[in-house]
Image: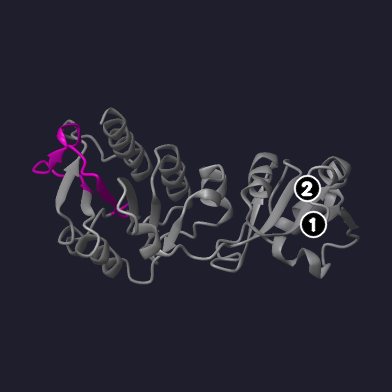
């Protein structure tokens, strides 16, 4: 293990860890940063490429015995951590990984086996996206498609909320989500399901999922716009009493995916 003790927060080897609280920090870059023992362990175990680990002095020897020998282990004093990353930090360890290649949609669609996909049209809140990825991993989703307007699936907050589901789920960051959905529908026979809040939509409990389906989830504020609804075969809703606010998209996604998974298990 290469242990490198850092004397100054201005050391260029710390650049990727600097000011992580900035909302634009490292967005869509080739590297990403995760924090905390559990996420770092899951990143190390994921097989994704790693650039370095950053630990407080008190944890240096412990982590030196737990990670690949060739991985640089950067060590800094506890008092320097907040100055470096821009917020109070008590977890003691961060890691920098390399973003994996974007998922190949056609390859993921090949084979014809029964499967469920998720498409996020405009999920901009990182914690909502992280929750959807976590539910997708829990309920056996084949892959998650993301429109350009979505949060970065490898942001620090998405990784934290998803508990590392973003490391193992196939992700397709689409440059043309409408075109990709048409490909799924027209060439591969995927049934597209619009998740909506509408009294005239099909109640979720009465829906029998097709063998190959994709669930579309819209933006937090506006749901799915008409052009997305027009692409879909069906509109499905979670019925609620009048006057009740719509569910958070993360919560709604978990309910939809539980229903889909439960039906598949029964079949």
**220 inside magenta stretch:** yes
Which of the labelled discs sits on residue 71, or is there none?
A: 1
Q: Which residues are magenta?
A: 195-221
Q: What's the mark number on residue 67?
A: 2
- Identify the image quadrant of residue 202: top left
Q: Position of residue 101 (x, y in %)?
A: 53, 65
**Left or right side of 168 for 63:** right
Report if residue 158 is visible in the image: no
Q: Nearer the viewer, residue 148 or 10?
A: 148
Q: Is residue 37 magenta?
A: no
Determine whether the residue tagged by mark 2 lies in a helix, strand or loop: loop
Marks 2/1: CA–CA distance: 7 Å
The answer to whether residue 94 is left or right of residue 200 is right
Residue 10 spot, x, y in % from top left: 82, 67
Judged from the image, the secondary structure of the residue bearing numbered disc 1 is: loop
Position of residue 193 measured from the top left corner of the image (x, y, whole percent): 21, 50
Asked if marks 2 and 1 touch (Cβ < 8 Å), the reply is: yes
The quadrant in which the C terminus is found is: top left
- Asked if residue 230 is positioned above or below residue 243 in the image, the reply reads below
At x 15%, y 33%, the residue is 206
- Residue drawn at the location 21% of the way across and 60% of the way down: 185
Instruction: Identify the residue shown where x is 71% and y is 60%.
Output: 17
């Amino acid at each position: 293990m290469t242990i490198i003790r850092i004397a100054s927060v201005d050391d260029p080897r710390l650049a990727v860890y600097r000011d992580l609280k900035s909302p634009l920090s490292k967005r869509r870059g080739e590297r990403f940063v995760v924090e905390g023992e559990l996420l770092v362990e899951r990143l190390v175990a994921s097989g994704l490429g790693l650039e370095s680990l950053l630990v407080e002095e008190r944890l240096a020897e412990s982590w030196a015995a737990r990670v690949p020998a060739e991985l640089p282990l950067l060590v800094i004093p506890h008092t320097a951590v907040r100055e470096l990353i821009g917020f109070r930090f008590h977890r003691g360890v961060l890691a920098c990984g390399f973003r994996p290649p974007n998922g190949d949609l056609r390859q993921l669609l090949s084979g014809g086996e029964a499967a469920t996909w998720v498409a996020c049209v405009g999920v901009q809140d990182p914690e909502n996206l992280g929750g959807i990825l976590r539910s997708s991993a829990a309920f056996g989703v084949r892959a998650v498609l993301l429109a350009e307007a979505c949060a970065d699936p490898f942001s620090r907050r998405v990784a934290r909320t998803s508990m590392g589901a973003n490391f193992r789920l196939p992700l397709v960051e689409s440059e043309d989500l409408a075109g990709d959905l048409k490909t799924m529908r027209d060439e591969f026979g995927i049934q597209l399901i619009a998740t909506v809040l509408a009294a005239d939509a099909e109640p979720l409990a009465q829906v029998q999922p097709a063998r190959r389906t994709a669930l579309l989830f819209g933006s937090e504020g506006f749901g799915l716009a008409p052009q997305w609804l027009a692409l879909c075969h069906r509109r499905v809703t979670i019925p609620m009493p009048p006057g009740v606010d719509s569910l958070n998209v993360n919560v709604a996604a978990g309910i939809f995916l539980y229903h889909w998974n439960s039906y598949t298990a029964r079949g």
